[in-house]
Image (cartoon, rainbow, N blue to C red):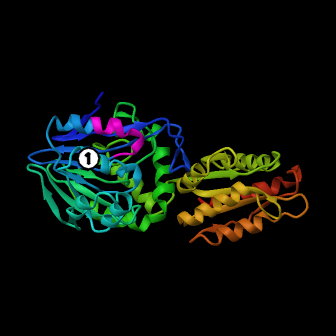
Amino acid sequence: MQNIQSIADGIFYVGASDRRLAKFENLFPIPRGVSYNSYVIVDDKTALMDTADASVGGQFLENVAAALAGRGLDYLVIDHMEPDHAAMVEAVLLRWPGARLVCNAKTVPMLRMYFPGNDAAIASALVVKEGDSLSLGRHTLSFVMAPMVHWPEVMMSFESATGTLFSADAFGTFGALDGAIFADEVAFPTRWLDDARRYYANIVGKYGVQVQGVLKKAAGLPIRTIAPLHGPIWRQDLEWFIGKYDLWSRCEPEEKAVTVLYGSMYGNTASAANALAARIAAQGVKVAVHDLSCVDNSEAVAECWRAAVIVLAAPTYNGGIYLPAGELLDDLKALGLHDRVFALVENGSWAPMSGKLMAAKIGELKNCTVLDQKVTVRGRLTAAQDAELDACALAVAAAL
């Protein structure tokens, strides 16, 4: 059964959702699934804006056919070549052999990599560059290059008649669509924002400079609708979500808040982390506490994007950092987190080393500082350390 919806005059949503996939990119847990968004423009000429993942291929093709309503397909616009959006390119060309590919120069070699049997279609592609336009009739597409947001070939397409920006992976989020496809229909700030932040920080976060460049370009466009490749479509409150992207891409803390992230083997480091969290909260500070052995690393990364101060607590393990905490710090370096304040809690029954080693890794992050008020636990926190905990809590509150 076809499942299409109109998002603007002459523009139809033809994507589909996958609730069976356990991990996005086989890395990031997606308990609420994911959507693969695609769009058809119907005018004097017809255009398909990207395809979909093979897992929803049958539904996707049925939706495209329904939107075309018996007409042929004139153009297949490829904004992003990642297989969760381009897997069905060959299937589309087989079903609508008259369709002409529209892409930029960096996309062409990727098309040859993924679809080596389609030389003729690739050779006849309409290769566009920044500022080029394509008239479909009443609708006109212009193209905005967005390299490294988050692949080198990425571009966005702006449809001027309806003010629709087809934004590729930018402004996307984890989560399957539950019938409603617009952000204003799904209580986005309470139900979707955490997944949007986690998607940004882990998928796009490393490329904040490039995202800032694209946001500057977008500021010059009369955008009325943002149609991303994952998650809800934006037709209201665009400034609010663009503001979130502006914060995230500058790696500016979203909230003046503290996140306490701890790893603990037998509960003693957890006890110290919770005791410190209580003292920080007593200062009137918003605090969240997470066990690094229980939350996925992608969630911990997103917390580091959200909060201004990060309390990291970990025991010494084989003379090093307890693995979940060490892996988090490695990820933060790879993703380019910067401009944060850290407070440390270390544990070591006979040779506490984790604090020194965590501080060294934090030192590799740009403009990140470690508070002097470290808490050192030897096996188990004692009442004699109340002053040590209070000093650390006061320093954390002052850092905000």
Q: Secondary structure at mark 1?
A: helix
Task: Estimate the x, y position of residue 37 in percent, counting from the top left.
Answer: 34, 44
Above or below: residue 175 compared with residue 390: above
Q: Examine the structure image and report whether residue 93 is included in the region drawn in magenta.
A: no
Q: Which residue is mark 1?
A: 94
The amino acid type of the residue labelled 1 equals Leu
Q: Quadrant of residue 393?
A: bottom right
Tell me what residue is drawn at x 85 percent, y 51 percent: 381
Tell me what residue is drawn at x 67 percent, y 67 percent: 370
**Magenta segment:** 52-62
Residue 352 visible here: yes
Residue 395 visible here: no
Q: Quadrant of the C terminus?
A: bottom right
Structural crowding at the residue carrying mark 1, measured as other residues with C-alpha within 10 Å and reported as few (<14), some (14–19) or many (≥20): few
Q: Quadrant of the N terminus?
A: top left
Q: Quadrant of residue 66?
A: top left
Q: In the drawing, does residue 84 fall left or right of residue 117?
A: right
Principal secondary structure, stretch drawn in magenta? helix
Task: Estimate the x, y position of residue 97 in percent, counting from the top left.
Answer: 20, 49
Task: Estimate the x, y position of residue 28 in percent, counting from the top left.
Answer: 55, 48
Q: Nearer the viewer, residue 322 or 76?
A: 76
